[in-house]
Amino acid sequence: MDREKSFVQLKKLSAAALIAVTFLLLGILFASRMEWTDTSLAEGDPVIEHLRSSGIINEKGESPFVSVAQKAMPSVVNITVRKEATRGSRERFDFGPFRDFFPEFHPDLPRGETSGGSGIIIDRGGYILTNNHVVENAADIQIKDADGHEYKGEVIGTDPQTDVAVIRAIDSDFSSENVAELGNSEAIKVGDWAIAIGNPYGLDLTVTVGVISAKGRSNLLISGGGPQYQNFIQTDASINFGNSGGPLVNIQGDVIGVNTAINAQAQGIGFAIPINLAKSIYSQLRTDGFVVRGYLGMVPRELDDATREALDLDRNMEGVFVDMVEDNTPASDGGLKPGDVITSVDGVEVGDPAAFRFMIAERKPDTEITMDVIRDGRKKRLEFTLANREDFVQIAGNIGKQQEDVWLGLHIEELNSPRARQLDLGVDEGVLVTEIDYDSPAQGKILPQDVIIEINRKSVENMQDYQNIVGKLVDSKDAILFRVMRSGRPTYEAVKP
């Protein structure tokens, strides 16, 4: 009997509690409708106040990335490119597990391709910043802005060495709201917010969020070769195919980089060209359609602790080690020698090889510069007059480029190239095979990362040897015997042209 009485009392208490909660909720709802309280952000709520003070939400209860997206999105365009058919053409993006799901973007197709990318409006006249690899070999360019308006595009100028390009939307009528605010990539810090906006896999105006995970990345082995001058911002904001050419922005919505590449081996790591570099390239491309660079004629190498110790230098000494000096170049004419340590250029300290290359490349031909070097423990000041890089590249590379494109479809680099040095092949003589065209007769015989050391039993010690031998074999129909170093072991392969 006592148990039944207790149960009845419990039911009464439960009913009373339910009625009280119901009236409380109705009261809050009524008060909010009368604007006595904020329905979503009640004043004094410690959780809400913490979210506000931490910057996780703003006064309206929105994510701070909402305003970033609203500011940056109008400047982002979707670029669709129909490319000319080029034998052995390659995209710089590696598609990884998705390559078979997007055949229209497949980099190995031996025909005209349709590919996609993004761009950044930086002038009301329709000028758009994007990547060179987005518009490279373009036969037709279509541009769609954030409002869905479409324009025909034209290439104003390209710079494969940094992977920057400028295109223009013909007959466009952009407003000031469409023009991106360009920030200062020198001011960014590791850990800062980074927001990528673009059109990954054709999904218009996609926003992804991460942080700046590193600065000054260089010597990256990007699919298709990548640009020679690399000084990438690294981010974990998701970047995929189609993001190329789109903006990487900071928490203020200002552009700090141009999204360019991904690391196919590491999920969630992407790279962007610093906007300060892109701006300097843009100026030349818009004016001239191309970029001219100074040329010195030497190979810089990192000054590591072992080299400092061997040269009896202070452990904290900064600079670059001169690994090689080419004959008949400004470097040799100015007295630079292998084994020198360059500590400054025009009074600006040198930190690493990548920074040093940019110091030289950003100066115009015929510019006079001074460099402080350490030689045999003593400081010296040398003077140089820079040459035009293109002149030397054409002289050294015309024959090799023709042979690379034509002869057996083999793409070759010197063993002192950044890619070869990064691979640490352990070989002193020969030339490195970096890529093989899809229709090459050497497919399955010669492999990427093979080092060619003999052709038809004639020694190949360097690129000059390779060019001399190949120059006599271009029209040969006979089988050719290669000796290559593969994974540290020499082997022979016969290739029938």
Image (cartoon, rainbow, N blue to C red):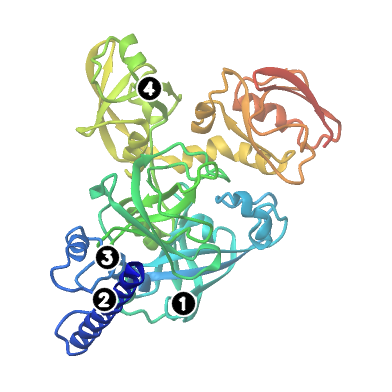
The label shown at residue 170 is 1
Residue located beneath label 4 in the image: 322
Question: Residue 279: horizontal and vertical position, in percent?
Answer: 32, 56
Q: In the rendered structure, which disc, 1 or 4, sits on the residue that comes first in sequence?
A: 1
Question: Residue 196: horizontal and vertical position, in percent?
Answer: 39, 59
| Distance CA(mark 1)–CA(mark 3) | 35 Å
Please, what is the three-letter code of the amino acid marked with disc 3? Answer: Pro
Residue 365 visible to the viewer: no
Please, what is the three-letter code of the amino acid marked with disc 1? Answer: Ile
Residue beneath the point at 19% across and 60% down: 50
Q: Nearer the viewer, mark 1 or mark 2?
A: 2
Residue beneath the point at 37% across and 62% down: 287
Residue located beneath label 2 in the image: 17
Element type where label 3 sits in the image: helix
| Distance CA(mark 1)–CA(mark 2) | 70 Å
Question: Residue 94: horizontal and vertical position, in percent?
Answer: 58, 49
Image height check: is 222 above or below 456?
below
Residue located beneath label 3 in the image: 64
Q: Are marks 1 and 4 in contact (CB under 8 Å)?
A: no
